[in-house]
């Protein structure tokens, strides 16, 4: 309820009602009080309904942890965790409870949310001295922190409000930063307040100079001040947003905060990943290609299975927690015939988004120790001895066909028991693992919807540039150029701003690259949305004007997003954008109609009071007239968008929306 009274317009109404009551004008006070009750009541009612609807949708979005139960690794909702559960941690995992670590492998956790330290903290299961501070408890992992790199397991010690994060959160009131829409409303309301104060002062001064009763002049001036403002603006805005929330919920779009709907509608550039958005997201394993002379395709597959973070004994039974490529590899029929269990894993360097590879040290009876690495072909080839032209030709043919390719390499490492990144060198390329992720059947229609809304779609992917270009060509995206991660590294900020605006594809990009791209596009004048679902997308989601994720995304991505799609479909997103624009258009309609009508009426009444020997209208008449007029405007938020609009009409609406939006934010609306 308190949020409703934060509007400058409602503050003006409250002050005016109080002054009228103090001066003995009960009629004015009652009318203004009725306006306040209607505005606050409608605002509270609509926000309450919208928040209930939002909570209902939130219940459909779950955070899960990988827990060892009944001898198997199972995904379990974090709300179902109990002390004593054994939790498995991997890259990008948000710690679901306070844990005592049992095993770690190069585990680093980002604990800045608790300690304020920007650098990740190294974790070790060895005990720490009694009385150690929060930042020094290396053997513990805390709820709300994030796995920066590495992996590990831990036992749940404390859950919920009893955790370190829970104790801090319970003592804080969550205050969300204001969006551009909220800031625009506030600036516009203050502009109206300034106009009302100036006009009130002027009218009161004129009436005093005309030797009219002071009390009567003051009440008339206050009525003019109230009458010139669109009193139900807060109610109209909340009604529009609440209506939009309910409509979006039916279209499988969850908006975390009501005001984010308008920011969604303001978007004119969408940067999205490729997998699962333009493609089905169901990666299929096609087969291995051997490159090394003495290596067979089955050996390439075996090495690929070995170079995963999954436990060999359990990976065939469950793919829980594995990345899509490894899951597809283990789920393939050839994997069931092989026996990687004969190998003993000695050490592991987990995958991260900078190295883009996983490296393992294994021991095979009778053959000794071997180092195997698997990852992005460009990064693996850089660690290998010179590769034949035939191998490079084979790789390029797969890229040209739109296949996703993972390179596998090895070297003998006799006597080695532990490995570091310094050991990743002098590999021999064994071959390639070929995967395919087909374009979605309806993606072309979804892209046409976005184009009709004047939204430019750009692709940011960690995949190879040729693969991304092939997918875009297959679905009809006309490329404006491709930038690789290496190209972005070589550019200054100004150069990137110019290049990012024209480029359509950003390939082999890291999380930092994505964030730089979003920043550059915003500097170029666009309102940028970013759609991502991985831990490597969290930084870009924070940087975008509107961060968009899906309910199947990682915990980090869902927490960083402003909007969550319950169906990862660009058509759903297009519907959300259209709804955001409808809400803004309806709000502007009320503002334009209300302010123009009120200003005309009040200016006429004020002018007449200066030339007539009596007041043209009683204060109560002015206020009652405005209340009845504004009540009729409450139908505006429920005005539906036009169905079947042509591309041209959508373009005209978009241009009007952008023009009004710019004027609204800079309070240049013609009053």
Image (cartoon, grey):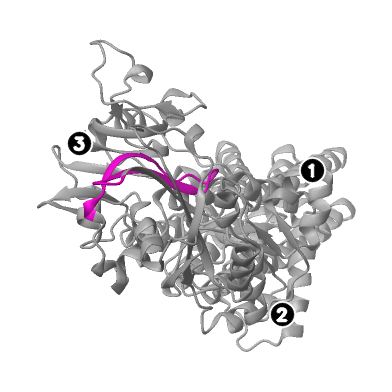
Q: Which class describes the residues within 10 Å of circle 2: few (<14), some (14-19), or many (20+)? A: some
**The residue positioned farthest toward the right in the image shown:** 611
Question: What's the distance in space between the residues labelled 2 and 1, CA to CA?
Answer: 34 Å
User: Which image quadrant for residue 607?
Assistant: bottom right
Q: Nearer the viewer, mark 2 or mark 3?
A: 3
Tell me if mark 1 has few (under 14), some (14-19) or many (20+) residues whose alpha carbon lies within 10 angstroms of its own. Answer: some
> Can you say whether 653 is above or below 42 in the image?
below
Q: Is residue 89 above or below residue 157?
A: below
Q: At 44% from the left edge and 60% from the top edge, which residue is drawn?
A: 294
- Point out residue 403 in the picture as x, y percentages from the top left corner: 54, 72
Q: Is residue 411 above or below residue 581?
A: above
Residue 211 on the magenta span: no
Q: How many marks can you see?
A: 3
Residue drawn at (61%, 47%), measured in percent from left and top? 382
Secondary element at tag 2: helix
- Residue 350 is covered by the magenta coloring: yes
- Residue linked to disc 1: 493
Q: Is residue 269 left or right of residue 233?
A: right
Which sits earlier in the primary sequence, circle 3 or circle 1?
Answer: 3
* Crowd tier of the residue under label 3, counting other residues whose Cα lies within 10 Å: few below 14, some 14–19, many 20 or above: many
Name the residue beneath numbered marker 2. 650
Residue at figure coordinates x 61%, y 65% from the top left: 630
Label 3 near label 2: C-beta < 8 Å? Answer: no
How far is disc 2 from disc 3 in space, using C-alphas?
A: 53 Å
Q: Of the residues tagged 2 and 1, which is closer to the observer?
A: 1
SS assignment at label 1: helix
Q: Is residue 66 above or below residue 630?
A: above
Q: Position of residue 254 (x, y in %)?
A: 45, 63
Q: Which residues are magenta?
A: 341-367
Work out whether residue 156 or residue 331 is closer to the camera in this orientation and state it: 331
Between 110 and 373, the residue placed more toward the observer is 373
How far from the left and from the top, in percent, is residue 486? 71, 49
């Amino acid at each position: 309820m308190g949020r409703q009274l934060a509007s400058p317009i409602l503050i003006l109404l409250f002050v005016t009602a109080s002054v009228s009551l103090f001066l003995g004008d009960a009629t004015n006070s009652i009318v203004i009080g009725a306006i306040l009750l209607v505005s606050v009541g409608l605002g509270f009612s609509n926000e309450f309904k919208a928040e209930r609807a939002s909570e209902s949708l939130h219940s459909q979005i779950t955070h899960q942890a990988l827990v060892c139960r009944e001898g198997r690794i199972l995904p379990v909702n974090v709300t179902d965790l109990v002390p004593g559960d054994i939790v498995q941690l991997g890259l990008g995992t948000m710690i679901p409870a306070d844990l005592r670590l049992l095993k770690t492998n190069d585990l680093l956790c980002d604990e800045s949310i608790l300690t304020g330290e920007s650098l990740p903290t190294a974790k070790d299961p060895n005990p720490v001295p009694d009385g150690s501070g929060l930042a020094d408890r290396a053997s513990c992992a805390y709820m709300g922190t994030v796995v920066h790199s590495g992996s590990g397991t831990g036992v749940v010690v404390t859950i919920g409000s009893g955790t370190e994060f829970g104790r801090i959160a319970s003592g804080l009131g969550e205050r969300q930063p204001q969006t551009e829409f909220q800031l625009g409303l506030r600036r516009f309301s203050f502009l109206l307040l300034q106009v009302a104060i100036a006009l009130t002062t002027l009218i009161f001064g004129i009436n005093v100079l005309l030797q009219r009763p002071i009390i009567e002049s003051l009440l008339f001036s206050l009525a003019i001040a109230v009458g010139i403002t669109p009193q139900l603006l807060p109610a109209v805005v909340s009604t529009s947003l609440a209506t939009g929330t309910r409509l979006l919920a039916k279209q499988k779009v969850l908006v975390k905060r009501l005001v984010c709907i308008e920011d969604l509608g303001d978007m004119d550039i969408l940067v999205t990943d490729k997998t699962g958005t333009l493609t089905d997201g169901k990666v299929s394993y096609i087969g291995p290609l051997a490159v090394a002379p003495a290596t067979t395709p089955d050996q390439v597959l075996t090495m690929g299975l070995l170079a995963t973070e999954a436990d060999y004994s359990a990976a065939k039974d469950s793919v829980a927690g594995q990345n899509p490529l490894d899951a597809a590899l283990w789920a393939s029929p050839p994997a069931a015939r092989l026996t990687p269990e004969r190998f003993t894993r000695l050490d592991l360097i987990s995958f991260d988004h900078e190295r883009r590879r996983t490296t393992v040290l294994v021991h095979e009876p009778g053959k000794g120790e071997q180092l195997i690495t698997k990852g992005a072909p460009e990064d693996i080839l850089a660690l290998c001895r010179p590769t034949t032209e035939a191998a490079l030709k084979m790789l390029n043919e797969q890229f040209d066909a739109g296949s996703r390719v993972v390179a596998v390499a090895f070297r003998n490492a006799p006597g080695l028991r532990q490995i570091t990144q310094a050991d990743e060198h002098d590999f021999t390329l064994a071959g390639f693992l070929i995967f395919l992720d087909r374009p979605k059947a309806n993606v072309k229609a979804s892209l046409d919807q976005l184009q009709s809304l004047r939204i430019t779609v750009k692709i940011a992917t960690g995949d190879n540039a040729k693969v991304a270009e092939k997918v875009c060509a297959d679905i009809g995206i006309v490329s404006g150029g491709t930038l690789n991660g290496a190209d972005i590294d070589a550019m200054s900020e100004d150069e990137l701003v110019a290049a990012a605006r024209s480029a359509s594809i950003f390939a082999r990009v890291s999380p930092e690259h994505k964030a730089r791209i979003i920043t550059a596009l915003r500097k170029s004048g666009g309102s940028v949305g970013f759609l991502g679902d991985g831990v490597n997308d969290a930084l870009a989601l924070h940087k975008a004007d509107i961060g968009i994720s899906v309910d199947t995304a990682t915990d980090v991505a869902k927490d960083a997003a402003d909007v969550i799609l319950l169906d990862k479909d660009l058509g759903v997103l297009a519907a959300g954008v259209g709804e955001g624009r409808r809400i803004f258009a309806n709000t502007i309609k009320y503002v334009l109609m209300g302010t123009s009508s009120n200003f005309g009426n009040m200016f006429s009444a004020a002018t007449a009071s200066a030339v007539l020997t009596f007041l043209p209208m009683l204060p109560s008449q002015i206020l009652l007239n405005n209340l009845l007029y504004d009540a009729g405007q409450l139908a505006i938020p429920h005005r539906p968008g036009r169905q079947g609009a042509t591309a041209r009409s959508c373009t005209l609406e978009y241009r009007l929306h952008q023009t009004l939006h710019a004027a609204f934010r800079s309070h240049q609306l013609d009053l």
